[in-house]
Image (spheres, helix red, strand yellow):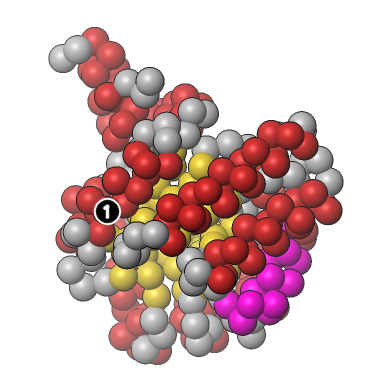
Amino acid sequence: MIPPIARRFVAGESPNGAIEHAKTINKRDVGAIVNVLGEHYTDPTQAEQDAEEYLELLEIIDGCENRICISVKPSQIGLDIDDTAFMNNLERIVDVAASQDTFVWIDMEDHTTTDVTLDAFETLTVKHGGGVGVCVQANLKRTATDLERLASLPGKIRLVKGAYDEPATVAYRDKARVNEEYRDLMSFMFESFRSGIAIGSHDPEMIDLASDLHRTYGTEFELQMLMGVRDDAQYELALENDVFQYVPYGDRWLSYFYRRAMERKENALFAARAILGR
Ligand code: FAD
């Protein structure tokens, strides 16, 4: 069972927990991006099981009138096995999702996976005329070029700063440099994209910049943040913006919770206090 302390960041172990959480945040105008926790499977059975779990999740989503989409990690549905296993599983998920009008996000993992992930996105978003989104990372030096290719495609692009510890040969490692790149890439997207910009960041400066760029170019956008991170800001921003919350669930919650708790001092203190019962 998930301890109460981890429930801030993880919506339970079952799809029903995630759907219940999604319904709660929907009431405050925040949409849900539901993710089944899992990554880096080298056993095809595990990848298959998670693909099946997404199909079951889609069936539940189809039955409720809520603002819910899903987000899938490539290495949880076969990318660490081979490209074909990944593509087959992803296509099954996206085909079902498209038939019921549920949006599918593809998370982006480390730089060795970027090409195959973007290729899969392109194939499926062209096949369905949209309904699919992919994440790109501002810390990667290649992303400006990738965005030029992605600008003319249907679907949506989520811009994030990048969560993976990448080598300096392919990535900017200095935080200020990544922020500069994030601002430049965001400006390019608002100027050049006609559909589907998602700002995946908790950074107030980047959120303000997105609002400014929207005023300048008129391009629509959505804000995306993680469950348990700046929740009050999410509800406040949802009064005037399209806001989605990334809602993970599943029995592999421990390492995800650990990452969230450790990434900021206040979260680590919150975790320690809760463990000590104060
Ligand atoms: P940071 O640069 O970490 O911080 C900037 C400012 O934001 C801080 O000074 C503070 O004011 C505020 N802030 C940030 N975090 C917190 C917090 N915990 N509590 C309070 N304030 C905070 N990365 C990938 O590599 N691939 C993905 O597919 C991916 N998907 C993502 C999806 C979503 C919806 C989100 C929100 C992030 C995703 N990320 C992904 C992670 C992303 O790359 C960053 O590592 C992460 O979002 C931290 O960067 P930031 O812009 O939020 O803020």
Does the segment drawn in magenta span residue 70? no
| Of 49 and 112, the residue lying toward us | 49
Residue under pointer 1: 23
Q: Is residue 48 visible?
A: yes
Nearest the eye: 154 or 161: 154
Q: Is residue 277 left or right of residue 228?
A: left
For the stretch drawn in magenta, the main secondary structure is helix
Q: Residues within 10 Å of mark 1 (few under 14, many from 20)?
A: some
The residue range painted magenta reads 117-130
Residue at x 61% of width, y 81% of height: 129
Q: Is residue 122 magenta?
A: yes
Compared with 61, 78 (above or below) is: above
**Residue at screen point 52% across, 29% down:** 252
Q: State which quadrant residue 115 falls in.
A: bottom right
- Residue 136 appears in the rendering: no
Hey, what amino acid is under mark 1?
Lys
Q: Is residue 229 above or below residue 139?
A: above
Element under disc 1: helix
Q: Position of residue 42 (x, y in %)?
A: 77, 33
Q: Could you tell me which residue is drawn at 24 percent across and 10 percent down?
A: 276
Rendered location of residue 259, percent (x, y): 46, 31
On the image, the x and y values in percent for residue 180 come to 49, 63
* 263 relative position to 154: left or right: left
Q: Is mark 1 within 8 Å of ligand 1?
A: no
